[in-house]
Image (cartoon, helix red, strand yellow):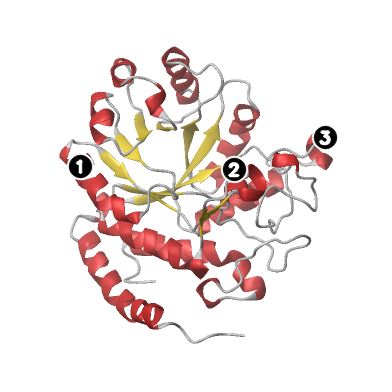
Amino acid sequence: MRRACSETLCRMARLRPLVLLALLGLLAAGPAAARPTAAIFYYPWYGSAARDGAYLHWEQNGRQPPLDLASHYYPARGPYSSGDPKVLRAQMRDIAQAGVRQVVVSWWGWGSLEDVRLPMLLRAAKARGLDVAVHLEPYGGRTIETLADDVAHLGSLGVSDFYVYRPLDFPAADWAQLNATLVGARIFAQTTLVGYAKLGGFSGVYTYDVLQNGGSSFGRLCEEAHRAGLLCAPSVGPGYDAARATGDLRVKPRRNGLTYDAMWISALRANPDLVTITSYNEWSEGTQIEPAKPEPAAGAYLSYDGAYGRHGQAASRAYLWRTACWTAVLAGRLTRC
């Protein structure tokens, strides 16, 4: 049964067009070439029994795929393998059609599954006109010295943008020494500590965590970053719910898309250089915008039904559809969503 909107939600709906028109004016103030673009965090770590001999990541926290997954949502593609070229091509098509220009790939060190799959992903992304960046994760044995080798290795594959997760694992002085040696690479630090990022010689900052860093912090972050001469890439996302995969009971509800919209509006108000999206397919944390089954196959799974007024099959792609709208506003092709 559909319910009439509450007084608060109705007021938000009436104000939203005015807010977006104001945002568009801010974005249009600069030359077209200076407009920010969107990047999205992507995970190539999934495996299926049929293709890889075992389910990978779908089985976290004692889950038993294919019906019982480490996610509160059930993917429309089922518990797939990220090594399946057909799946990969479809995912890159999703991302390109959503107006995103950069895929930020989770990477866990040389020889890792993510490293082995990277060349195939690079080809699939290139076929869709997408740039690929790398998310340098906190793999075992990660040091400043290994990170220097990582950047050189990945740079030889054509990667020039790097996002460092948990940069505070190392002192800013150590980062400054490394970053001073890098040529032609942009290195973003996952932190709101702009002073640390500046001392470390980073190119910019991003937030990633949509639970801890809501939109209310974006204005201050970007103002401080720009004052320090750094790029600002705040991270937006539809919500967070990781209990089935990790036992984490913290939740950021999606509110049928209102959470995602609010974060986008806050990011655009902050005058970003780049908007990063958490995430395309981090199913275990419930931040994904990849299509989910409209009527989940088994268990107490959630769905996107009702997001942006969409239901059934149309709802399964609701967040990709909305992302396409927001990236069009970002690019100046639309005045509002």
Residue 260 vs 176, above or below: the answer is: below
* Secondary element type, mark 3: loop
Q: Residues within 10 Å of mark 3 (few under 14, many from 20)?
A: few
Determine which quarter of the picture holds residue 187: top left
For disc 1, the marked residue is 224
Residue 3, given in percent of the width and then of the height, sits at: 53, 85
Front residue of this view, candidates 201 and 182: 201
For disc 3, the marked residue is 53
Q: Residue at x 41, y 65 (%)?
A: 261
* Secondary element type, mark 1: helix
Q: CA distance from mark 2 to mark 1?
A: 37 Å
Q: Amino acid at mark 3?
A: Gly
The label nearer to you, 1 versus 3, is 1
Going by the picture, which residue comes out furthest to the front?
249
For disc 2, the marked residue is 124
Going by the picture, which residue comes out furthest to the left?
227
* Secondary element type, mark 2: helix
Residue 320, given in percent of the width and then of the height, sits at: 53, 61
Q: Residue at x 45, y 83 (%)?
A: 5
The label nearer to you, 3 versus 2, is 3
Residue 102 vs 138, above or below: the answer is: below
Q: CA distance from mark 1 to mark 3?
A: 49 Å
The label nearer to you, 2 versus 1, is 1
Q: Amino acid at mark 2?
A: Ala
Q: Which mark is residue 34?
A: none
Upstream in the sequence, badge 1 or badge 3? 3
Residue 51, given in percent of the width and then of the height, sits at: 80, 39
Residue 47 vs 302, above or below: the answer is: above
Front residue of this view, candidates 46 and 97: 46
Determine which quarter of the picture holds residue 307: bottom right
Q: CA distance from mark 3 to mark 2?
A: 23 Å
